[in-house]
């Protein structure tokens, strides 16, 4: 397997293969002379680091001699990361419990922040630098490097892993975060000790959710890192439903002032006050120049891990704009003994040379002490620099190389080296015959193949001296954890990037965000988090209606209609209240509907009750007067027994009106109309009989009319009243048995009220009841009208005529008024009709008699009643 990989990579690296009868071999046709640093060992680990910022990459072709790329701009941090790997290898070699009797070596190359250089460095590590490789018949042998730590760029890692993954060469990146690298189909041997951008994106969304920022702008770099981050951010933000993007802009790779002006103009015009940037510090420097030129302030910046801790942006010129920035940062760690190791670096200890004329350490030395090891070229002026002696002391200069207070990428490098070492150690601990490979075999140093180490890397699990657990999931991603950083601008002008929280994922709690808000510095007045929303939240009582052509975070708040409520903020729909409930004025809760009926507590109910009791009292008084004066002529002359029955029935009429007042119940609904119908029939029957008696007496007074009185004796009068009343009782009984009146909650009259009423049940029964009363009343009226011209001694017929005329007028007016009156007003109309007709009968029939009895007793004599007495005034 490995010689086949060796041969394939050499073909890519301009090598040619030939065979002989004895053996096969590959000869290196060309060499990439790269900037590197090496240490021999039984097993060699490769490393790719960004030691220089820029490179001039000559045109390369497969037909010309490869040319040396020129790198510029020494990166002290990149060099410290490379030295961290060297220190981790040295520490492992000193550890007696890890890789006993095995010495690790390393080959570290500078990628010069260029894809071409990094790719050639990776292929060089994979193929080796021997001039000729002899392939034996067993195809046995170990690869030039066991695994590669790197690269730092997602773009370079994609290119390198796509090729090396074909041969299962393990690469463990310490800074490549693109979520696309989690694709195991494309990158089967890629691992990383830094969380994927997928987790970083979710961490950003959690921060947005924590501060209720639902409206934000997103800026990304025009590379794999930025574009995949934008794709993940849009997808996850949409799925979470926690907000939306006001704009998405791609920062140009090169220098494009017009495009940067357009992007900053979009930022300035947008209402989004939160700006999220997935880009490296180079993109941010170009962007911030335009931001400063246009003086765009009042923005809350959120930084990805690529520029959260970038010192080049932490300047007094940029802090008025960038202070208060919240950023995602790689987990900080501590590496004991690293400072001592860095202080031991000395040019005399690293004398490996290449076409640069010096090593990485020499370049670092020249950059730190501003001197040169090489002889000065022609035209060199001595004042322009000094010659390096190699005796300079690192502790005498201020350099961020020795600032180990914020080890983040270095800590990931440290974990990556240890992950490879633990995987190799696990493989070497394998018991023959019980291994995980074909035939239960194990791997060995002599026959090791890269894919075997990939198997053990997938299962590696250890804890660093700092207490962090290191393992990889099924996609090669490490357990995700990030620090949340905040850029603090102190009053004295100092700039501090402080830790204000963390976001991590655990098996038990899932993704968890922890923030210490009291420590966060806000670049706003007052010192509080800004509001960044497209539309303010819709309060309870309203619902959200999305604005046409706008993202879903932009909406209008429409009040709920009557009978509907929303009791949550940002409700999408209003909820219909239950049948007996109605919406409150604020439309935020359902309240019990008001109930309406003719109550004893209503002013109208009190008046009607008082009137009913007054009528009852008057009937009782009149009855008392008639009982007291029962032997006087005027009482005896007008059929006293019928008068007493009439007064009792009027009493019942007054009292039955009380059944119409109060909350309707089954028994009151059934009793009210029956009592009303029977009481009034009793009353009208008495009047009818009284009228017929008056007419019979008149006829009996004429010659030959004595026979008519035998039909109107006392028993006949009682029987007539009883029969007429029994008919009404039968009607009421049939009505109650067939379709009884019942209480009903009516919601048709008012949406916000429940009108309690008694439904009549059978309309036919109610009509028959009223018709029977009307029939008797009309009959009484007609008979009384016929007797209206009788002599004065029998003039009670006139009173009956008037009373029945009044009675009929009231009930004729009652019918249309009752039909057109809803709810309790129908009860009011009926009670009013009962009281009006009762008072009409009481006053018309008994008023004149009480007047004579009480005020004109001289007229209460037999002579006057018979029309023969003379009344002297």
Image: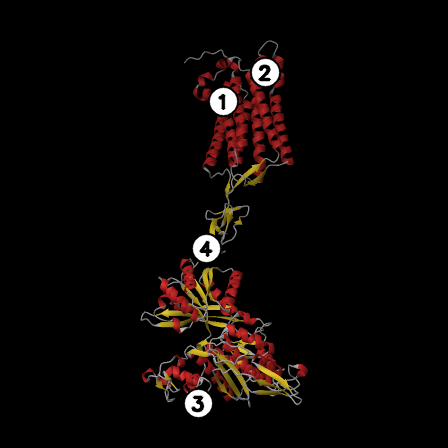
Q: CA distance from mark 4 to mark 1?
A: 72 Å
Placement of the N terminus among the 4 image quadrants: bottom right
The reply to whether dot 1 and dot 2 touch (C-beta < 8 Å) is: no
**Residue shown at the point (45%, 61%) measured from the top left:** 216
Name the residue beneath numbered marker 1: 844
Secondary structure of the residue carrying tag 2 is: helix
Q: Which mark is residue 696?
A: 2
Q: CA distance from mark 2 to mark 4?
A: 88 Å
Q: Earlier in the sequence, mark 3 or mark 2?
A: 3
Placement of the C terminus among the 4 image quadrants: top left
Looking at the rendering, which quadrant does residue 360 occupy?
A: bottom left
Q: Is residue 166 left or right of residue 520?
A: right
The reply to whether dot 4 and dot 3 touch (C-beta < 8 Å) is: no
Q: Earlier in the sequence, mark 2 or mark 4?
A: 4
Q: Earlier in the sequence, mark 3 or mark 1?
A: 3
Q: Earlier in the sequence, mark 4 or mark 1?
A: 4
Q: CA distance from mark 3 to mark 2?
A: 152 Å
Where residue 804 appears, as percent x and y from the top left, is 53, 22
Q: Which mark is residue 92?
A: none
Name the residue beneath numbered marker 4: 537
Determine if residue 360 is in view.
yes
Closest to the observer: 366 or 829? 366
Q: Nearer the viewer, mark 4 or mark 1?
A: 4
Secondary structure of the residue carrying tag 3 is: helix
Q: CA distance from mark 4 to mark 3?
A: 66 Å
Q: Which mark is residue 349?
A: 3
Q: Residues within 10 Å of mark 2 (few under 14, many from 20)?
A: some
Q: Earlier in the sequence, mark 1 or mark 2?
A: 2
Q: Nearer the viewer, mark 3 or mark 2?
A: 3
Q: Nearer the viewer, mark 2 or mark 4?
A: 4
Q: Is residue 685 left or right of residue 519?
A: right
Secondary structure of the residue carrying tag 4 is: loop
């Amino acid at each position: 397997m490995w010689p086949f990989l060796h041969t394939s990579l050499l073909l890519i690296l301009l090598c040619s293969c030939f065979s002989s009868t004895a053996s096969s071999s590959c000869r290196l046709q060309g060499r990439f002379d790269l900037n590197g640093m090496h240490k021999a060992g039984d097993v060699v680990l490769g490393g790719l680091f960004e030691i220089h910022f820029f490179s001039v990459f000559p045109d390369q072709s497969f037909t010309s001699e490869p040319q040396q790329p020129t790198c510029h701009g020494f990166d002290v941090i990149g060099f410290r990361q490379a030295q961290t790997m060297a220190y981790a290898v040295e520490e492992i070699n000193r550890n007696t419990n890890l890789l006993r009797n095995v010495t690790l070596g390393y080959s570290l190359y500078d990628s010069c922040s260029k894809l071409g250089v990094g790719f050639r460095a990776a292929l060089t590590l994979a193929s080796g630098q021997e001039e000729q490789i002899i392939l034996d018949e067993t195809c046995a042998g170990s690869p030039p490097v066991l695994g590669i730590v790197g690269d730092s760029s997602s773009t370079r890692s994609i290119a390198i892993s796509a090729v090396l993954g074909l041969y299962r060469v393990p690469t463990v990146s310490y800074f490549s975060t693109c979520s696309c690298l989690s694709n195991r189909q494309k990158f089967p041997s890629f691992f990383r000790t830094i969380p994927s951008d997928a987790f970083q994106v979710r961490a950003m969304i959690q921060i947005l959710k924590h501060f209720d920022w639902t409206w934000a702008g997103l800026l990304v770099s025009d590379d794999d890192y930025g574009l995949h981050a934008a794709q993940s951010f849009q997808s996850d933000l949409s799925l979470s439903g926690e907000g939306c993007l006001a704009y998405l802009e791609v920062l140009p790779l090169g220098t494009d002032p017009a495009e940067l002006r357009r992007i900053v103009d979009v930022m300035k015009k947008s209402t989004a006050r939160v700006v999220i940037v997935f880009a490296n510090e180079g993109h941010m420097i170009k962007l911030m120049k335009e931001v400063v030129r246009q003086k765009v302030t009042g923005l809350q910046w959120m930084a990805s891990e690529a520029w959260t801790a970038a010192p080049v942006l932490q300047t007094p010129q940029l802090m008025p704009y960038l202070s208060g920035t919240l950023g995602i940062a790689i987990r900080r760690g501590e590496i004991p003994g690293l400072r001592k190791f860095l202080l031991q670096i000395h040019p005399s200890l690293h004398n490996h040379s290449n076409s640069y004329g010096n090593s990485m350490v020499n370049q670092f030395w020249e950059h730190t002490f501003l001197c040169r090891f090489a002889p000065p070229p022609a035209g060199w002026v001595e004042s322009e620099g000094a010659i390096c002696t190699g005796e300079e002391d690192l502790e005498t200069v201020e350099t961020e190389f020795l600032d180990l207070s914020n080890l983040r990428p270095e800590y990931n490098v440290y974990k990556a080296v240890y992950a490879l070492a633990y995987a190799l150690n696990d493989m070497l601990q394998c018991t023959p015959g019980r291994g995980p490979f074909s035939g239960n075999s194990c791997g060995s140093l002599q026959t090791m193949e890269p894919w075997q180490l990939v198997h053990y890397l997938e299962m590696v699990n250890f804890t660093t001296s700092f207490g962090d657990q290191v393992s990889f999931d099924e996609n090669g991603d490490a357990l995700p954890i990030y620090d949340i950083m905040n850029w603090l601008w102190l009053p004295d002008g100092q700039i501090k990037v402080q830790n204000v929280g963390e976001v991590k994922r655990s098996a038990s709690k899932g993704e968890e965000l922890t923030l210490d808000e009291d420590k966060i510095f806000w670049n706003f007045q007052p010192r509080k988090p800004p509001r960044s929303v497209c539309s303010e939240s819709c309060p309870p009582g309203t619902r959200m209606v999305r604005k046409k052509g706008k993202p879903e975070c932009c909406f209008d708040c429409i009040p709920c209609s009557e009978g509907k409520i929303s009791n949550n903020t940002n409700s999408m729909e209003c909820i219909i209240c239950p049948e007996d409930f109605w919406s409150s004025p604020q439309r935020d809760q359902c309240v019990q509907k008001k109930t309406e009926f003719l109550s004893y507590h209503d002013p109208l109910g009190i008046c009607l009750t008082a009137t009913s009791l007054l009528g009852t009292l008057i009937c009782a008084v009149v009855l008392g007067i008639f009982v007291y004066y029962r032997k006087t002529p005027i009482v005896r002359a007008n059929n006293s027994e019928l008068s007493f029955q009439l007064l009792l029935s009027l009493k019942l009429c007054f009292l039955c009106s009380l059944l119409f007042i109060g909350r309707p119940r089954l028994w009151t609904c059934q009793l009210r109309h029956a009592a009303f119908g029977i009481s009034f029939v009793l009353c009208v029957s008495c009047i009818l009989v009284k009228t017929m008696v008056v007419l019979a007496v008149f006829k009996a007074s004429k010659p030959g009319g004595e026979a008519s009185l035998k039909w109107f004796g006392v028993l006949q009068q009682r029987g007539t009243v009883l029969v007429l009343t029994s008919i009404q009782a039968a009607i009421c009984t049939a009505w109650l048995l067939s379709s009884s009146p019942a209480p009903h909650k009516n919601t048709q009259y008012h949406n916000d009220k429940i009108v309690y009423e008694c439904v009549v049940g059978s309309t036919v029964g109610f009509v028959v009841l009223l018709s029977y009363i009307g029939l008797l009343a009309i009959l009484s009226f007609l008979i009384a009208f016929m007797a209206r011209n009788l002599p004065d001694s029998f003039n009670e017929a006139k009173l009956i005529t008037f009373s029945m005329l009044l009675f009929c007028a009231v009930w004729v007016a009652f019918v249309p008024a009752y039909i057109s009156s809803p709810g309790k007003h129908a009860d009011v109309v009926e009670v009013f009709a009962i009281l009006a007709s009762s008072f009409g009968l009481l006053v018309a029939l008994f008023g004149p008699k009480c007047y004579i009895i009480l005020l004109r007793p001289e007229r209460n004599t037999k002579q006057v009643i018979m029309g023969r007495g003379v009344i002297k005034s």
